[in-house]
Amino acid sequence: MTEVFFVLTVIYAVYVIYVVVSDKKKVKVIDDSAPAMMSVVHVDVKPLIPENITTQPLAKSVSKTVKPAATKLGLKNPETGEIVTNYGNYRFMKRWIKEALVSEGLLEKVYQNKEINTDVEVKIKEALARLESIERYQI
């Protein structure tokens, strides 16, 4: 048995040496025409705002109607104050988030891992977006 093991070890060592030596013999050819093909293209950029609208009145109207986006993303447990920022995968989501989705009426039940399919995943993502918009769950 030891002889068979020794022979297999020698064959493997020879194969490794062969692969290492044959890789050194390969020569990589660099195509010199590649830099010539890469050239800078100049494009005229047009502003996205039409010319008849000035920027200051637009900025004032936007600032009055749109709330600034929250810089912190995540959900806060209103009972314990725990903050969760990574809850994208339903299978690894905290239990209180799953229960909050059901208690708020956003989902009909807490799904088991084997019940999750593409249709359920879409429902869960929509429910999470709605849960993030509820004020008591915001950070």
Image: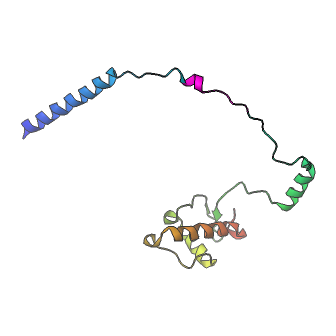
Please indicate whether residue 74 sits to the left or right of residue 54 in the image: left
Q: Which of 70 and 16 lies nearest the eye of the viewer?
A: 16
Q: Position of residue 107 (x, y in %)?
A: 58, 76
- Picture colour scheme: rainbow
Which residue sits at x=90%, y=54%?
Answer: 60
Asked if 26 appears above or below 11 in the picture, the reply is: above
Which residue sits at x=77%, y=35%?
Answer: 44
**103 magenta-colored:** no
Quarter-of-image position of residue 37? top right
Q: Which of 116 and 51 lies nearest the eye of the viewer?
A: 51
Which residue sits at x=89%, y=57%?
Answer: 61
Asked if 88 appears above or below 51 in the picture, the reply is: below
Please indicate whether residue 6 sits to the left or right of residue 72 in the image: left
Asked if 1 appears above or below 115 in the picture, the reply is: above
Which residue sits at x=9%, y=38%?
Answer: 4
Q: Which of 17 and 46 lies nearest the eye of the viewer?
A: 46
Q: Position of residue 95 (x, y in %)?
A: 53, 70
**41 magenta-colored:** yes
Q: Position of residue 104 (x, y in %)?
A: 64, 77
Q: Position of residue 121 (x, y in %)?
A: 53, 67
Please indicate whether residue 101 sits to the left or right of residue 1 in the image: right
**Magenta-drawn segment:** 34-42
